[in-house]
Image: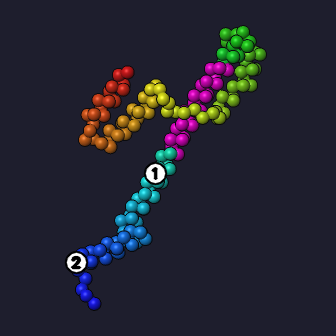
Amino acid sequence: MTKQTKFEETVEFWGKRLNEETTCSLNSNARKLNIELGSLMYDLFEIQAKINTCEKKIRQNRFSWWYRYNLATRTMKKFKVRDIYKSPKASEYWVRWFPKCDMEFKGKTPIISDQFDNTNRNILIGLLQEMYMRDLANKDKYIYVLNKLRED
């Protein structure tokens, strides 16, 4: 049997390392990275749940105020009164329909739209503030952009 050359030993080592990485053995980088990936996926699911909760609260809040406003204007118009509480019929109608304003809005309205309105501006400001806290080396750039957004 001939002695292996240095290059053949290196190739054999690479083959062993490839096998370790493929099987995610204890000493492999793939095992460490897969564990980190699992942790990041958990964080992603948690963040997605928080995003969904915030979007739901925004929709419910918007619907609640829309419902109250439209119910009040509809009641005033229907009973031809300016103060709902002074008219027994209008007050009865109001009491019957008002509790439904806290029910969940079924429609899905997108929070992030194509237009640059206050909603998107606030989302962008929150994103930039978080980026600013994580990247202090470029803080002057973030502060400049944040100030420009707040000026408008």
Q: Are marks 2 and 1 in contact (CB under 8 Å)?
A: no
Tell me the crowding category of disc 1: few under 14, some 14 to 19, or many 20 or more residues within 10 angstroms, Cα based: few
Q: Residue at x 32, y 43 (%)?
A: 134
Main SS of the magenta part reads helix
Q: Secondary structure at mark 2?
A: helix
For the residue marked with disc 1, what is the amino acid?
Asp
For the residue marked with disc 2, what is the amino acid?
Lys
Quarter of the N terminus within the rendering: bottom left
- Closer to us: 59 or 10: 10
Q: Secondary structure at mark 1?
A: helix
- Residue 43 visible from this viewpoint: yes
Q: Which mark is residue 123?
A: none
- Where residue 38 sits in the image (x, y, percent)? 45, 58
- Reading the image, the residue beneath label 1 is 43
- Where residue 72 sits in the image (x, y, percent)? 66, 18
> Which quadrant of the figure has residue 101?
top right
